Image (cartoon, helix red, strand yellow):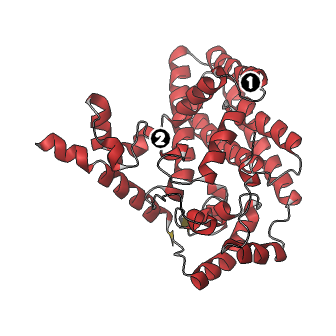
C-alpha cells in the first residue's frame, strides 16, 4: 500500500524551491515529544470516557458521556490521520500497528481502507474523476452528476446545502459500512487482520452498551455518540476543499495542491480542535510534515505563493462552511430548476 506521503516530487517545478526552503528550515523533522504528549492525552481521554461510562451505569446522564466520547473518537481519528502520513513514526510497520489500533480497534474503521482512499485524495484533490472524496454519492459536488437523479436522491441533491450538517450525523456509520465493503473485496493488505480488529471493536462496543444500559438508553447513547462523532469529524474536513476549484489534472504539483485547498485562520485552539487540518495548504504540499510545524510553514508558503503568483486562500472557520454550503446549493440548482418546470 502506498502512503500519501510517498508520492514522488516533480523535480524542476515551482514546488522545488519551496521544498528546499522548508527542508532548510527543519520543518520536516519529526516532533517525537509533541506526539508522545498528544498520544498520551488522547489515550487517557479515551480511557476516561469509557471509565465514566462504566462507573455511571444505567443512567440518562450517559448522553453527556456519549457527547464527550464523540469528541474523543474524533481526536483519535485525527491522530490516526497523522500516523498514516508518517508524521509520527519513521517505519511503516510501527505506523500501521498504531494506525490499526487507533482506527480499527478504538473507533471501528478500517485503517487500511482509509489510507488507500486518502492517498488517492492527496494525489488528485477535488478532481471529479480521481478524488474519491468528491465522487457522487449522497452529496453531489459537480453539477453534471446531479442531472438524471430521481426520487429521494433528487430531493437530497436539491436541498443538499440545508441537509449537509444533518447528513454528517451518518458519517461514522458510512465509514464503517465502506470499511466492511472494502474488506469483502480481495486485494486489501492484511484483510483478515483488519476485519478481526474491527470485529473486536464492534462486539466490545455493542456488548458494553447492551450490558450496562437499558435497551432505550443504549439506542439513545448510540445515536448521540455516533452522531456527534460524525458531525465533528465531518466539520474538520469540510472546510478544507469543499467549494474550491476542481482541477483538470494538467496543473503542476504546487498549483494542484494550493488551488484546491483552503486554510482556516485561528490560534492554537483551532489547531487542536481541527488536528492541524486548518493549515490544509501546507498539509497538502507537505503531507509528512508534523502537524505542529504546519503553522510555522505557513508564512513561508504564503510568501512563496505570492512570489510565483499562485492564489493562497484562507478564511475564518464560519466563512469556510458558508462557502462550502453555497457551493453545494449552486451544484443542486439544475435539479431545482428542473423540478419547477
Q: Residue 62, percent across and down?
A: 59, 30
Can residue 30 be seen here?
A: yes
User: Mark on residue 1?
Assistant: none
Residue at 48 percent across and 58 percent down: it is 248
Residue at 78 percent across and 27 percent down: it is 190
Which residue in the protein does label 1 denote?
Answer: 191
Residue at 85 percent across and 61 percent down: it is 31
- Which image quadrant for residue 24? bottom right
Q: Is residue 69 left or right of residue 48?
A: left
Q: Residue furthest bottom?
A: 307
Q: Is residue 307 left or right of residue 106?
A: left
- Which image quadrant for residue 221? top right
Q: Residue 176, percent across and down?
A: 59, 28
- Classify 10 Å Cα crowding around label 1: few (below 14), some (14-19), many (20 and above): some
Residue 45, placed above or below residue 15: above
Which residue in the protein does label 2 denote?
Answer: 168
| Label 2 vs label 1, nearer the camera | 1
For the C terminus, the quadrant is: top left
Q: Is residue 15 left or right of residue 316?
A: right
For the N terminus, the quadrant is: top right
Amino acid at each position: 500500500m502506498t502512503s500519501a506521503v510517498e508520492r514522488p516530487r516533480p523535480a524542476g517545478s515551482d514546488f522545488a524551491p519551496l521544498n528546499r526552503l522548508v527542508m532548510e528550515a527543519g520543518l520536516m523533522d519529526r516532533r517525537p515529544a509533541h506526539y508522545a504528549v498528544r498520544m498520551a492525552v488522547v489515550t487517557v481521554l479515551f480511557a476516561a470516557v469509557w471509565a465514566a461510562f462504566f462507573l455511571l451505569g444505567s443512567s440518562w446522564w450517559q448522553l453527556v458521556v456519549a457527547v464527550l466520547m464523540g469528541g474523543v473518537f474524533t481526536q483519535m481519528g485525527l491522530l490516526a490521520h497523522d500516523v498514516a502520513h508518517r508524521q509520527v513514526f519513521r517505519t511503516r510497520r510501527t505506523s500501521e500497528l498504531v494506525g490499526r489500533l487507533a482506527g480499527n480497534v478504538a473507533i471501528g474503521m478500517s485503517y487500511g481502507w482509509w489510507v488507500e482512499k486518502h492517498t488517492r485524495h492527496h494525489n488528485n484533490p477535488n478532481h471529479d474523476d480521481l478524488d474519491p472524496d468528491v465522487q457522487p454519492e449522497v452529496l453531489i459536488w459537480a453539477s453534471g452528476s446531479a442531472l438524471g437523479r430521481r426520487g429521494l436522491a433528487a430531493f437530497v441533491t436539491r436541498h443538499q446545502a440545508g441537509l449537509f450538517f444533518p447528513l454528517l450525523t451518518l458519517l461514522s456509520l458510512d465509514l464503517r459500512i465502506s470499511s466492511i465493503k472494502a474488506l469483502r473485496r480481495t486485494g486489501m493488505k492484511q484483510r483478515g487482520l483488519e476485519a478481526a480488529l474491527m470485529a473486536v471493536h464492534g462486539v466490545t462496543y455493542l456488548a458494553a452498551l447492551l450490558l450496562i444500559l437499558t435497551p432505550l438508553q443504549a439506542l439513545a447513547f448510540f445515536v448521540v455518540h455516533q452522531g456527534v462523532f460524525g458531525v465533528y469529524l465531518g466539520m474538520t474536513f469540510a472546510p478544507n476543499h469543499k467549494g474550491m476549484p476542481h482541477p483538470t489534472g494538467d496543473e503542476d504539483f504546487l498549483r494542484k495542491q494550493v488551488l484546491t485547498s483552503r486554510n482556516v485562520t485561528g490560534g492554537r485552539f483551532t489547531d487542536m480542535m481541527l488536528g492541524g487540518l486548518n493549515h490544509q495548504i501546507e498539509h497538502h504540499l507537505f503531507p509528512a510534515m508534523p502537524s505542529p510545524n504546519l503553522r510555522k510553514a505557513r508564512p513561508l508558503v504564503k510568501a512563496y505563493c505570492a512570489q510565483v503568483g499562485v492564489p493562497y486562500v484562507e478564511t475564518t472557520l464560519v466563512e469556510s462552511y458558508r462557502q462550502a454550503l453555497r457551493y453545494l446549493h449552486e451544484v443542486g440548482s439544475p435539479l431545482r430548476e428542473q423540478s419547477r418546470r
